[in-house]
Amino acid sequence: MNLDCPLPHTEDEVVLLGHGAGGRLTAELLDTLVLPALGGPPGGPLEDAALLPGSGELVVSTDSFVVSPLAFPGGDIGSLAVHGTVNDLAMRGALPVALTLAVIAEEGLPLSELRAVLTSAGKAAHDAGVPVITGDTKVVGRGAADRLFLNTTGIGRRIPGLEPSAARARPGDAVLLSGPIGLHGIAILSTREGLGFEADIASDTRPLHRLVQAIAPYGAHVHTLRDPTRGGLAASLNEIARDSAVSVEIDENALQVPPAVASACDLLGLDPLTVANEGCMVAFVDPAAADGVLAALRSLPEGADALRIGEAGTSPEGRVVLRTLVGARRIVDMPLGEQLPRIC
């Protein structure tokens, strides 16, 4: 049974912040406007990266970054732009081959800030082992942009035997999470609004391709990979449940929510499941391979806290359920719109 209730349309509709939040409004915008306009099939799995036509191994992804503030505990827009695109490639089982980087700067932006951001991006690319091979720079008038926006496009090459897809999760799969959730979104919000949490919370932004490389020996046993960025873990699990026609049940006891993140979410009325992350991934794997995949994840610093958090089932299709600390069950819905704007 499909319980989705489509939002009504009117002739005077406008773009909302929520259309860029990675939740239901984003999905609706893609299905009703973007994909039909560009000739894409509506309702299909929306992957983090796409296979290049005519190539069985090359993968491409593009992303734009409008995070505010430009710098935050744990990173800045430059490193975030590199990590975000490297990670999108990795979620399709690809290692990065090359990046492009485009700059849209507002007139009046101090050159020292631009230099710091680009230096950070260059270091992040070097650390990830991927060259930035081309780019573009545009400057717009004061007030036509908010200081600095970046766009990155990445080309990757798939690791042989590894073909994860949002549509490949299967009933019985173990659901694994590589690390704690909520750090990035709360770090951004605290810095932007001056809430004071940044002393205890830093963004988890980092590249994840080495984690994917570590689990590559499990090949076909790795069905789905997704990094829960906009919309958090809730959005990623709902997308996978929808695209794979499975149910998902996760255990609140198994989720790692850092105490400072939990406190901030309690104070602000946020659900950690919907808060963005930039340095962890969720994996759906064959249960027989789950222990081996966990061991491989834990062999690297970025996966040291990896845990099994749940499993996929058969019914009801497309439903995500949380087993709470007191043993109850609650539905985890796809977030509707924008809780935390401009977090990436």
Image (cartoon, rainbow, N blue to C red):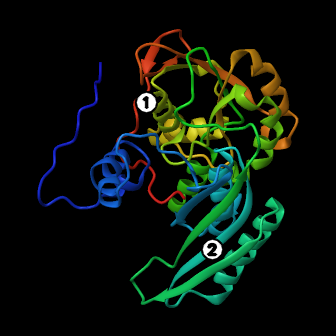
Among numbered discs 1 and 2, the one appearing first in the sequence: 2
Structural crowding at the residue carrying mark 1, measured as other residues with C-alpha within 10 Å and reported as few (<14), some (14–19) or many (≥20): many
Amino acid at pointer 1: Arg
Quadrant of the rendering where the N terminus is positioned: top left
- Label 2 sits on residue: 101
- Label 1 sits on residue: 242
Say above or below: 262 vs 341.
Answer: above
Say above or below: 40 vs 148.
Answer: above
Foreground residue among 301 and 190 = 301
Is 294 positioned to the left or the right of 51 in the image? right
Task: Determine the secondary structure under disc 2.
Answer: strand
Structural crowding at the residue carrying mark 2, measured as other residues with C-alpha within 10 Å and reported as few (<14), some (14–19) or many (≥20): many
**Distance from label 1 to label 2 (Cα)?**
32 Å
Is 337 positioned to the left or the right of 7 in the image? right
Q: Position of residue 226 (x, y in %)?
A: 60, 40
Residue 282 visible in the snapshot? yes
At a point 80% along the width and 20% down the height, the residue shown is: 291
